[in-house]
Amino acid sequence: MGSTSDIYTLLRLYGKKQHRTQISVEEFCNYLLKYAQHYVTEQPDLAKYTKAPRESLLAELDNLAATNKVILKEEEGNQIIVISAYFRETVNSRYKQMATNPSIPYPIPTDLPKDFPQELISQQDAGTIIYDLLDGKEHGENVIYSLVFRREIAPVLLPQGVTAEFLMQSSIAKLRDLMNHGEQHDYFLQKLMTSNGGRSLAVKNFFNQFISNEEETIIKFKEAGDCYYFLNQLFLFVRQDFEKIKDKTPEDVDLLQAVYIAELCASFYKNKVQLNLQKDTALKNLELSLGKQPYYFDSAAISKFVDSRGVPLLGQYSEEDLNDYLTKSTTPTVDNHMPPLLTFKTPDGNRYFVLNEKTLPLLMKLCTEARKTVHDSITKEWFGLLQKFQSVPAMKNIKDFDQRLEEIVEVEEPILYSLLNAPFLKTIYYDAIDNKNANNLDKFNFFNDGELLPYSELLMLTPHSVMSDAKILLPVWYTLPGLSFILALIFGRGSMSKKAKNKKKKKESASKSTAQKLQSSSTMSVSTESPKSQNIANNKKEEFKMAAATIEKILVPPDSSLDSELTSYLNEWNHILDKEAKKNLTEDVNSLIRDYLRKILRTASPSSITPERINELAETLVKTPALQKINDHANLHMYVQLYMLRLIKKA
């Protein structure tokens, strides 16, 4: 063997040569000095031991003692090195023999030699250690566990290097060896059959497998399936019989230890199967929760999911299980299909999860709900501009209008905005069309020729309808031509004065004088003409109301009322069950009717409001793209006529 500079190796070699497990520090120092002087040329690391090795050696020994490779103790003033590896190997050798001969008993503390260092023994609860080892935890370094059972029986010594798997296999092997004896075979088989009347065939099959097929027995043992009940019964019968023995032989003790170990292992796998079942059930409940409203969830919301009993799901599975599920569910399949769970981020950086199958229904819902929010926001914005007699390009240009809608959606409805801009939307949309498995896609489109529809179409908003609603909010004098012109001059004075700074003083004073005269004359004109124009407007309204009342007598049965008929026809064409969604759809339709009728009445005369004209207007409106999505055209057509009459009567 070549030279070495490893102190632990040198120590073991020296101890083996001297046939001793304990060596004094002084003795080993002398040996180390000679060894270092002889091999320092081959091993330069030995140089520190060539003159005064004691100090360097003690530092190395402290490191070895920290990991239980050696034990340092004092005897009669001398420091003694105890090489623990020899003692551990003594216990390990017993397990090596058991691998070929299961009748050899487990090592117990009384088997150890008198000089065995007790520092190497760590007393531990047998159940705790066996559960930990089966769960994948490592054995304590260079320590021998003394597995203490909760029954009055000698503990089993378990050294590092012996796995829990081998411990379990050896316990079953000992019990199988017992059952293979003719007397014991028939005795325990009969006990099993007696306690399981009517299941004789199942008992025989289990028992024959247990004593003849070790590999299959271990598999069934870990599965904790149907045979788990028979296994526990068999362990119970053996334990009851051998615990009754007063003067137990080493063989009796060994069998009891084997039964205790087997029961602990069986309990571990039973618990593991139950935990796995609980975890699988909880993960299924997680998937069900993801399919419930609001359909999109962030990590914080997912961690708070509960089952039908209100018990949190996190705890029935671990955080690691949850992360594994989310990672696996959001990963594309092998054939590169979309994963079942999709992720998207909002503009503020929050990450959300949504089921693939719920994405399109969620988008339809969000578009419907967002329409009112966006409509109110841009109407309020334009109302403020109109008050100041200002305008923006979005009021006249549809592209600018769409751009402004998108900006509002990004701020007011970040979930909708993020989904509409998600990279996966186009794929799942066209996949749904190809598979014909998406409800209402023929009524609610998101793409046209591969391009996302404009926001005005998605939200069913137009610049004209928004402008009309914004103007309705204005005071009446804003709509009077002369007065509105004067107000525009007043509100626009700031901008006019900026231009005037570049003109001569003479023109500036002239323009101011002209404006004052115009304002004065306009005010007088309004004050003298307003009562007259007001009377004309009132007379015209009354004529419209009379025309509407005449048509109402034709369309509304004598035993009913206009409001009752409206409610009846509304319920016929609007079949949505969700109250909020139904209300939103009704308001959308009513808004379209109001906008359309307002434009017609501006140029219409009361004499033109006839049943035929109302029918024609309703037919035209029902055929518009926005209302074509409603299937029941007949009832909708009647509803539109009645709603128009109601608007005219209340004008």
Image (cartoon, helix red, strand yellow):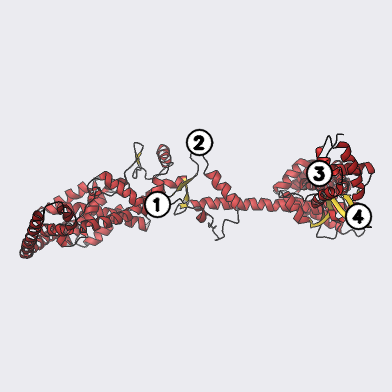
Image depth: mark 3 or mark 2 in front: 2
Q: Nearer the viewer, residue 252 or 465?
A: 465
Q: Residues within 10 Å of mark 1 (few under 14, many from 20)?
A: some
Q: How many angstroms separate mark 2 from mark 4 (CA)? A: 64 Å
Q: Is residue 189 visible?
A: no
Residue indicated by mark 1:
414
Q: Earlier in the sequence, mark 1 or mark 2?
A: 2
Q: Amino acid at mark 4?
A: Thr
Residue visible at 33% across and 49% down?
407
**Residue 381 occupies quadrant:** bottom left
Image depth: mark 3 or mark 1 in front: 1
Q: How many angstroms separate mark 4 from mark 3 (CA)? A: 31 Å
- Give residue 214's position: percent from left, percent from top: 78, 42
Residue indicated by mark 3:
211
Q: Earlier in the sequence, mark 2 or mark 4?
A: 4
Q: Earlier in the sequence, mark 3 or mark 2?
A: 3
Image depth: mark 1 or mark 2 in front: 1
- Give residue 448's position: percent from left, percent from top: 33, 38
Q: Earlier in the sequence, mark 1 or mark 4?
A: 4
For residue 110, which numbered disc appears in the image? 4
Tell me the quadrant of the picture where the C terminus can be found: bottom left
Q: Nearer the viewer, residue 186 or 366?
A: 366
Tell me the quadrant of the picture where the N terminus can be found: top right
Q: Secondary structure at mark 4?
A: helix
Residue visible at 38% across and 56% down?
578
Instruction: Using the image, determine if residue 100 lies above or below residue 120.
Output: above
Q: Amino acid at mark 1?
A: Pro
**Residue 483 occupies quadrant:** bottom left
